Image (cartoon, helix red, strand yellow):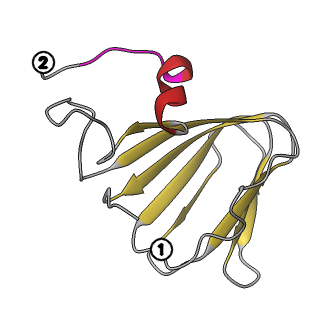
Amino acid sequence: MADWYTGNANTDADAHRGWLLGHFIKPDGDVRATEAVEVKWGIHPAGQERPDGWSTGETRSTVVILVSGRFQIDLTGDGGAVLAEQGDYVVWGPGTDHTWRAREDSTVVTVRWPSLPN
């Protein structure tokens, strides 16, 4: 396998629910297969919500960065943010439960580390 890769996030995202890098990329040896980090290209139509409700018991850290649209992240308790301007982001660490909702058609980049099986 080559130690480099070029692709298109819109096309490649379909293979793994939007995730472009992470432990789940197969085959092993693909430069995108890593246990260090996960990167997701998320395209969400207005009104779409996290399909599984709240994500709980998280052991990783996460950052979500808004590319376009308006995107709401709800965090444990009364925390959270509405990402409204390009470049707005929110970061949380292990143990913080979360869910999300696209208030408008939105594109976000999510980075999670490390990359661990659920």
Q: Residue at x 54, y 28 (%)?
A: 14
Q: Is residue 38 left or right of residue 105?
A: left
Residue 107 against residue 75 in the figure, above or below: above
Q: Quadrant for the C terminus, please.
A: bottom left
- In the image, 53: left or right of 26? right
Given the image, on which type of amino acid does mark 1 rest? Glu
Which residue does the numbered mark 1 point to in the structure image? 58
| Point 71% across, 76% down: residue | 79
Residue 108 percent location from the top left of the image: 62, 39
Q: Nearer the viewer, residue 4 or 84?
A: 4
Residue lying farthest bottom? 77
- Disc 1 secondary structure class: loop
State the residue position of label 2: 2
In the image, which residues are magenta? 5-9
Q: Which mark is residue 66?
A: none
Rendered residue at 22%/32% (across/down): 27
The image position of residue 18, as x and y in percent, is 54, 36
Q: How many marks?
A: 2
Q: Quadrant of the N terminus?
A: top left
Q: Which SS does the magenta portion mostly show?
A: loop
Q: Secondary structure at mark 2?
A: loop
Residue sitting at x 26%, y 18%? 5
Q: Is residue 79 above or below residue 103?
A: below
Q: Look at the image and say whether residue 61 sits in the magenta stretch.
A: no
Rendered location of residue 34, percent (x, y): 23, 45
Measured in 3D between alpha carbons, the distance from the residue under mark 2 to the one under mark 1, in whole angstroms, is 33 Å
Give whichever of 50, 94 is nearer the camera.
50
